[in-house]
Image: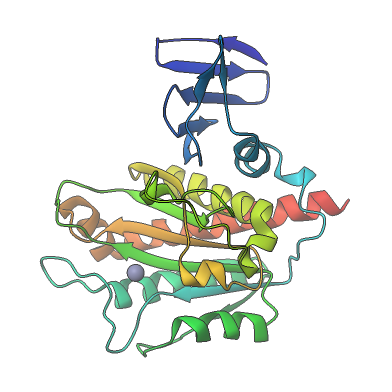
Amino acid sequence: MTTSTPTKKQIRLQNKWNKLEFQTDSRSAWINGTLVTLSEPVRKVGWQWAMDATDFDKTIEPAVRPQEFLKGAGVRTVVLDPGHGGNDKGASSPRNVQEKLVVLDIAKRVKQILKSRGIRVELTRESDRALDLGDRCRKAAALKADVFVSIHANATANRSVRGTETFVLSLPGRYSSNSYGSGNPPSSVYNGNHYDIANMALGFCIHRSLIKTTGQEDRGVKRARFQVLRDAPCPAALVETAFLSNAKDEAMVIDPAGRDRLARGIADGISTYLANVKRAKK
Ligand SMILES: [Zn+2]
């Protein structure tokens, strides 16, 4: 790859196929234009800029060349997990648009699209009912899930914050995206960490497709130790589709066409991931 520095705080690596952009002294990186959060900042070591080797192996590589690493992954069953339900409403908007209902609707749309492509899809819940976090993963295991995607919507006090972010499980011994530098990062290896490479490949495919399909603000592929990601029995990602607390995002999820675009983005991302797995097996 050829290296250039478009600005003082930017490093760009590019070849015929891929473009990697890094912000110096920061964890933000753009892989072919899609934002990912690294576990450690790109830092100056001596005279050279350097990145954490684990970030290269577990974040950059699976996003850039997923077909090289997915030989052992499955393609038969996709389990979609609409967040919350029943008494647990999840986030809500100023106009009382409820996360639990929005994400169920989106999940059903994703199921329809994938089913029309001949893919077996199951939901952890088909109706507005409460479901324990542990039960969601146990259900995915019982269904022999090959892909697990949890679907959520966000809300925050700052109403100007909007966009889409996609989470995959934090790496053992590395910080989560939203808790950098606080204490030592946990070194625990969870069940979900058996799929670190596939998690990233899946999360990246879904996120990239979602941003392309919806035109949503790109808040990046991030890492967290959410329970459904820790306990997942297969490669897994958790999508925060939009911020219900933001007027523009709220308008999108109120509109059936907006929910359809979100569903199409998720479905296309899952399809791309499955195509990469199939290519890896050839
Ligand atoms: Zn949620």
Q: How is the image coloured?
A: rainbow
Left or right, residue 89 beside residue 168: left
User: 191 or 36, which lies in front?
Assistant: 191
Q: Position of residue 68 (x, y in %)?
A: 79, 43
Left or right, residue 141 beside residue 216: right
User: 150 or 173, which lies in front?
Assistant: 173
Left or right, residue 217 beside residue 28: left
Instruction: Pick out the residue farthest to the left.
Output: 94
Q: Position of residue 126 (x, y in %)?
A: 45, 86
Q: Position of residue 177 (x, y in %)?
A: 42, 48
Name which residue lies at 71% across and 39% down: 65
81, above or below 16, in the image: below
Which quadrant: the N terminus? Answer: top right
Quarter holding ligand 1: bottom left
156, above or below 27, in the image: below
For residue 67, which quarter of the picture?
top right
Name which residue lies at 28% across and 72% down: 99
User: 183 or 86, which lies in front?
Assistant: 183
- How many marks do you count on the picture? 0
Q: Position of residue 264 (x, y in %)?
A: 48, 58
Left or right, residue 149 beside residue 147: left
For residue 45, which quarter of the picture?
top right
Instruction: Pick out the residue farthest to the right.
Output: 282
For residue 74, which quarter of the picture?
bottom right
Name which residue lies at 59% across and 33% down: 52
